[in-house]
Image (cartoon, helix red, strand yellow):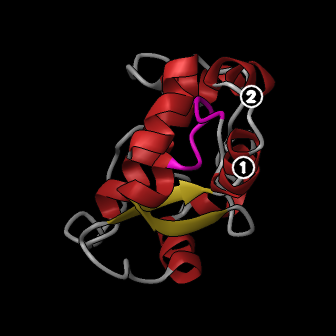
Amino acid sequence: MGRCYHGTLQKGYYNHPLYQTWARMLRRCLDPICSDYHRYGGRGIIVCERWLNIENFISDMGAKPSSLHTLEREDNDGNYCPENCRWATTKEQGRNKRTTKIRLEDLEDIKRLHNGGSSYRSIASIYGVDHSTIYHIFKG
């Protein structure tokens, strides 16, 4: 099968459970008209040559573990390719967004700073977030 993108069909795969995931990935990276293009193709994120064929995408990714899982790039600045993609839940993906500034690994240090007497504002300045973010960490 030849190249296929921009949401066009690859014979026999339109009803496959991963077809929409594959087609949306391609559209985000290849279609300047797509509303999310600026976050993907517009900033240089590409789909590897191998995954332009849906059969290869299905073979490399396998089935979704559940209906709650979606395609995630582990490195948000990396491309869509077997080495950089996995299935993840929305909650897991939320921890890997470009806008997430405090990582789970940072929480212990934040708690240590707070227990040592540092104010919410001083901790916030270290992590480049608003002090209310630090406040909400401690308030649950």
Dot 1 amino acid type: Asp
> Could you tell me if the residues under marks 2 and 1 are in contact, i.e. CB atoms within 8 Å?
yes
Q: Secondary structure at mark 1?
A: helix
Residue at coordinates 47% horizontally, 76% vertically from top-left? 58
Residue at coordinates 34% horizontally, 45% vertically from top-left? 8
Instruction: Report which residue position mark 1 lands on.
Output: 106
Does residue 91 appear left or right of residue 3 in this picture?
left
Instruction: Magenta stretch: give its range.
Output: 95-101
In the foreground, 53 or 107 = 107
The image quarter containing residue 30 is: top right
- First of labels 2, 1 by sequence position: 1
> In this rendering, does residue 17 appear at all?
yes
Which of the labelled discs sits on residue 127, or is there none? 2
Location of residue 120 in the rendering, given as x and y in whole percent from the top left corner: 62, 25
Location of residue 35 in the rendering, given as x and y in whole percent from the top left corner: 38, 19
Does residue 69 appear left or right of residue 117 in this picture?
left
